[in-house]
Amino acid sequence: MSSEEVERVDVLELFKSKKYLNISAPMVRYSKLPFRKLVRKYNCDLCFTPMIMADSFVVSELARWNEFVTDATDRPLIAQFAAKTVDEFVTAAQLVYPYCDGIDLNCGCPQRWAMQDGYGAKMLRSPELICDLVKQVRASLPQPFTVSVKIRLQSDRKQSVELCRRLQHCGVSFLSVHGRTAAERRQPADHDAIGLLASACPGLPIVANGDVDSVQVAEKVHEQTGCAGVMSARGLLHNPALFSGFEQTPIECVREWVDVAVSTGLSYGCLHRHIEMMLEEQLSAADKRLLHCMNCLPALLDFMQQTYPQHFLF
C-alpha cells in the first residue's frame, strides 16, 4: 500500500465534467499501477485496480503491499474488492480510504473459482447481501469517497433492473454493467440492456462495459445507452492508446510501456505479456513466434531495437 495520503478526487463531479468518462476496467493480473500509468497518458479518465480479495487483504499486511500499490500520480483511482461479509468489505474500504477515491464491489467476475467460493457474479443471487454491503460501507466513510458495484447482466432483465434500483436506493454512487451474463463469454455485449438499466435509474451514473475497443465504439455505446462512462478491458490491453483515437497501439506507446514497467520494477513476465498483446496485430507470424520466445529483458529490448530502430534507441 502507498504510505502517503493524497488529495481526494470527487469521482461523481468527474462524471459531471464530461459527456462520458473513459475508464480502464479492473483486470486480474493486468490493471496494476504501471499499466494504469500508461493508459492515463492516453486520455483515460478513471482507473480501477485489479479485483482484490478482501478477506486476505484485511488480515495480511503482505497481501496489502502486494495487491494495492499506488502513488500520488495514480488518480483518480477506484479500488475493487471481492467480498461477501460486511466486516471484510468495510475494513478493506477503511484501509484503502486514504489512498484512493472510491471502493467497488465485484459482482461480475464469472471465473469458476470465484463463483464456487460465492464471489463475483455468484453475488447476483444475493441482492440483499449486496445492498447491505453497500449501505454499511456508505455509512462508514464520508463522501465524496464513492461506493460502487460492478455487475453483469442477469438472464431475466427485470431482475437486473430491480437490483439496480435497489442499489440506487441504498446509496450506491455509480454502477458498472458488463453487457453479458455470467454464462456468456464471446457473445456480443448487449448494450441495449445496459441502456434499459440506465433509463430505469435516472440520476444514477451507469458505466457500460463490453466490446469497447475504439473511440468510435465508445461514442456509439454512449449514444446507444445514455451511459455516463465507457469501460474497456481487452480493448485497452491490445491498444492502451485507444481512448486517444489510435486504431492500434502506437510504437511510442510500447516504448513508454517498457520505460514505466522497468522504472516501477514490474516483473518481466508481466511486461512481456503486455507487449505481446499490444503488438499482436502488427507483427508477422514469424516475429510473433520470436517475441513469444523472449525470456529476458535484454533479449526483448534487442528484438524491439531491431524491429523498431527509430523508437528503441538505447
Image: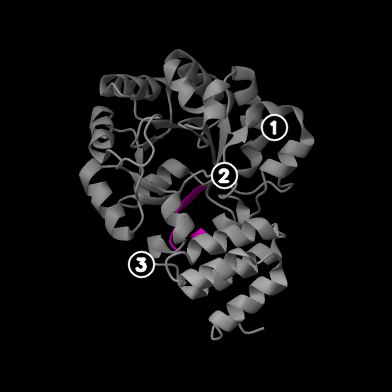
Q: Is residue 278 magenta?
A: no
- Left or right of 111 in this view: 189: left
Mark 1 and mark 3 in contact? Answer it, CB < 8 Å: no
What is the x, y in percent for residue 308?
53, 81
What is the x, y in percent for residue 151?
41, 31
Q: How many marks?
A: 3
Instruction: Choose the circle earlier in sequence order: 2 or 3.
Output: 2
| Towards the viewer: 277 or 19 | 277
Label 3 residue SS: loop
Q: How is the image coloured?
A: one colour
Instruction: Choose the circle earlier in sequence order: 1 or 3.
Output: 1
Which amino acid type corresponds to the residue marked 2 in the rendered image? Thr
Q: Which residue is mark 2?
A: 49
Picture disc at residue 133: none
Task: From the image, state whether disc 1 or disc 3 is nearer to you.
Answer: 3
Q: Which residue is mark 1?
A: 57
- Left or right of 291 in this view: 126: left
Please provide the residue range marked out in magenta: 39-47
The quadrant in which the N terminus is found is top right
- For the residue carrying disc 2, how many other residues have a C-alpha within 10 Å: few (<14), some (14-19), or many (20+)? many
- Marks 1 and 3, how far apart at CA: 38 Å
Q: Quadrant of residue 157?
A: top left
**On screen, 44 above or below 123?**
below
Label 2 residue SS: loop
Instruction: Choose the circle earlier in sequence order: 1 or 2.
Output: 2
Q: Which residue is mark 3?
A: 247
**On screen, 211 above or below 154?**
below
| Towards the viewer: 143 or 227 | 227
